[in-house]
Amino acid sequence: MRTQSPPHPAGVKVNGPVTAAFAEILTPAALSFVAKLSRRFSDRRDQLLQWRMERQRHLNEGEWPDFLAETAAIRRKSWSIEPLPHDLRDRRVEITGPASDRKMVINALNSGAKVFMADFEDANSPTWENTIQGQLNMRDAIRRNIDFTGSNGKRYLLQNHPAVLKVRPRGWHLDEKHVHVDGKAIPAGLFDFGLYFFHNTKTLLKRGSGPYFYLPKLESHREARLWNDVFSFAQEELKIAPGTIKATVLIETILAAYEMDEILYELREHSAGLNCGRWDYIFSFIKRFRHHPDTLLPDRSQVTMTVPFMRAYTRLAIKTCHRRHAPCIGGMAAQIPVKHDPVANEKAMKQVEADKEREAQDGHDGTWVAHPALVPVARAIFDRYMPKQNQIEKKREDVAVSAKDLRAAPTGSITEAGLRQNIRVALLYMEAWLRGVGAVAIDHLMEDAATAEISRAQVWQWIRHPRGMLEDGRKVTQALVRQMVDEELAKIEEDQGPEAFSQGRFKETAEWFLYLTEQDEFAEFLTLSGYERL
Ligand SMILES: CC(=O)SCCNC(=O)CCNC(=O)[C@H](O)C(C)(C)COP(=O)(O)OP(=O)(O)OC[C@H]1O[C@@H](n2cnc3c(N)ncnc32)[C@H](O)[C@@H]1OP(=O)(O)O
Ligand SMILES: O=CC(=O)O
Ligand SMILES: [Mg+2]
């Protein structure tokens, strides 16, 4: 990589290589802007991460979360979010994919989906190259100046009427280690948000759209307040009208589910509703209740959207949003098309259809898909059940969800196949992530950071929980997991062939996976220790 050193603003240090193209993103003015965000907000970010640990301590001591007494008035009173911009009123199908993959960005924008969420979070491995390439892709897509030629010579160009663009910056827990401000790594979410906002807002507004975001992994309304303050400050700095930014918050942590009204309230000037991020939600349930004896989840495949606690959460999200005139978007079915097997493909498509049908009937105002082939599948369902732009008028006053309903673990079994699936998915996904690939098809399912988190968290919990036993009575132990890791690695080697296998990073991944599952302290996110290895 050819690098050059542009002048950096005082106090800002860029440790990653800066090519001529990267320098177009990492301009002195853009770096000054993100440094301002960092100086103003990173201490608050740090305090909020501390607060997460504080809450975890209470949960470990046996407390259960509840709706907050101090914000009861917000839940009781009548208020609404600000009206939605015209291009965010109909979001019946939203496709997602890593911002860093230029071909996928073009395919997603051309997919016929209403919205494309370009991801710097779950679907992205945050290498320096992916992070800055993602910003370049966004800049070029917004200026309708993006193309790509595949290794097979296939040309990719943007068609007319592309999807509306939304960007998901990284969560509060991550830093961008390649950029330091006054000696401290910049919070990755501020970096991703700040660069995108700085470079693109004026062009987006000229095109009749706006700077739209998805906010991942929030755990409380205080974290929403921080984002809201970041938005207000960023708008003021660039002289953009207040309320121009619109953000959809993913309700994908168990604790955020108890604060949905409050999250909407904090962001009401900037809100574009909520989304039910089911995979991180399951992960968060395991993580936060890991020491509660009666919250042991069965095999991942048995924790479906129809188990009571998942149903409680999504229906409450819809009711909460619609009361505040906000949209509530559904989540991602894991199935993707199965190539060369029409029967298996038909089954997968039927599973996606059933998932979308339940979401549309419940009252979601749109949904996520992982693959362009699923756009027409999801659209057909939403067209059938949602004749208008959205169904915010469906108030769901019939829905009653208690604090206890949100945490009721389903019954089910832990099987050898389930344990093996967790180990296999974690090994394959984490190895790809180390190579800079953040979303992967594994056994015809979409896997990303959130789904891999479920896998490694379940193994951690099953080893420690007295009822972490396979159906046949065997206790899940470190020794059993070690044995299965070896066996699953052997299968992967057989599938991939010895040469491809040896070129991968499987040995290191196995060590990393065993470190995560064997250490008594549960790692908050696998991507934190992963980032040190990138
Ligand atoms: C828990 C959550 O956070 S969910 C949200 C985050 N996760 C994601 O965004 C995952 C999105 N999906 C993907 O990344 C991909 O679909 C994968 C990795 C699962 C599978 O991708 P592939 O192996 O390339 O699938 P496949 O070979 O079937 O792709 C066929 C074509 O569709 C394109 N495609 C596949 N998925 C997408 C997508 N999400 N967006 C745009 N294009 C896509 C491929 O680029 C390929 O294009 P081509 O025919 O021009 O070469
Ligand atoms: O981000 C989405 C999820 O399901 O996790
Ligand atoms: Mg997620």
Image: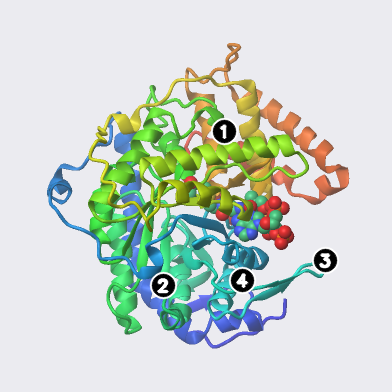
- Dot 1: element: helix
The label nearer to you, 4 versus 2, is 2
Q: Earlier in the sequence, mark 4 or mark 1?
A: 4
Q: Do tag 4 and tag 2 residues touch (Cβ < 8 Å)?
A: no
Q: Earlier in the sequence, mark 3 or mark 4?
A: 4
Q: Earlier in the sequence, mark 2 or mark 3?
A: 3
Q: Residue 469, image x and y in percent?
A: 55, 17
Q: For the residue carrying disc 1, how many other residues have a C-alpha within 10 Å: few (<14), some (14-19), or many (20+)?
A: some
The label nearer to you, 1 versus 3, is 3
Q: Quadrant of residue 266?
A: bottom left
The label nearer to you, 3 versus 4, is 3
Which residue is at 49% across, 32% downward? 304
Q: Which residue is mark 3?
A: 152
Quarter holding the N terminus is bottom right
Q: Which residue is mark 4?
A: 133
Q: Quadrant of residue 319?
A: top left
Amino acid at the residue labelled 1? Glu
Q: For the residue carrying disc 3, how many other residues have a C-alpha within 10 Å: few (<14), some (14-19), or many (20+)?
A: few
Q: Earlier in the sequence, mark 1 or mark 3?
A: 3
For the view shown, which residue lies furthest in the bottom direction?
7
Which residue is at 60% across, 45% downward? 447
Q: Does the closest atom of ligand 1 sit within 8 Å of the Cβ of label 3?
A: no
Q: Does the closest atom of ligand 1 sit within 8 Å of the Cβ of label 4?
A: no
Q: Residue 188, image x and y in percent?
A: 47, 64
> Gap in Å between the C-alphas at discs 4 and 1?
35 Å
Q: Do tag 1 and tag 3 residues touch (Cβ < 8 Å)?
A: no
Q: Which residue is mark 2?
A: 211
Asked whether residue 439 is in view, the answer is no
- Dot 3: element: loop
